[in-house]
Amino acid sequence: MKKIYLICILFVFISCKGKSAVETSFAIPENAITPEEAAVAQNEATSAKSALAADGSKIDYDLSEMNSNMVYSQVFNMMIEPEIYDDKVIKMRGNFAVYPNSPTANGGTSYAVIISDALACCQQGIEFKYDFGDKLPKEGDIITVTGVYVTAMLPGDMVFNYVKADSVEM
């Protein structure tokens, strides 16, 4: 039995001798773009098709044009790293929500846009400030809010993020 096993092993070694293994190349082609070039191209494409806010200013982050998973991820990132988005113009679309007796509005009413992921199982809300006058949307209505993202400090060193809305479309 040992002889058969030894012969099989020798056969494998002898039969493969002189043949080169199939080469798998992971070399990057010379004409491939680098990640930096891809980022620049993406920024240029985004800038070229950037929408304008009602006042004519450039929209830095148009969440209304992203798919629901990207929007949810972007909003999550806005909550985690608010300093990146501070003073940037944001456009977002979602369900209108009202919060009476809000501590962030000194006991007044706060408004928010509720944004869901693709399956609508997870939701994030971004508070916004806007004077609706007599034209307050119904809770749950789909609205589009455009405005400047603001990071403020509340008493007790609590960070408070909201959008100072320039326009609300219902």
Image (cartoon, rainbow, N blue to C red):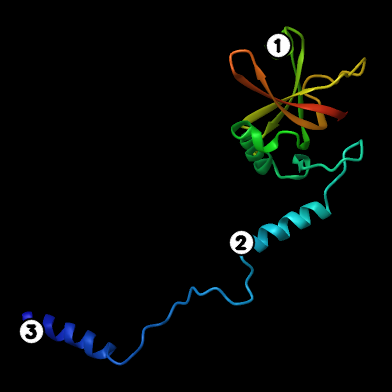
Q: Estimate how packed mark 2 is, as few (under 14), some (14 to 19) or many (20 or more) residues with alpha carbons within 10 Å.
A: few
Q: Estimate how packed mark 3 is, as few (under 14), some (14 to 19) or many (20 or more) residues with alpha carbons within 10 Å.
A: few
Residue 119 appears in the figure: no
Q: Which mark is residue 102?
A: 1
Residue 162 appears in the figure: yes
Question: Residue 8 location, x and y as percent?
Answer: 17, 84
- Report the residue marked by disc 3: 3
Mark 2, secondary structure of its residue: helix
Q: Nearer the viewer, residue 152 or 59?
A: 152
Q: Nearer the viewer, residue 15 or 51?
A: 51
- Amino acid bearing label 3: Lys
User: Which of pointers 2 and 3 indicates the residue nearer the eye?
Assistant: 2
- Report the residue marked by disc 2: 35
Q: Residue at x 79, y 19 (%)?
A: 139
Question: Residue 5 location, x and y as percent?
Answer: 12, 80
- Amino acid bearing label 2: Pro
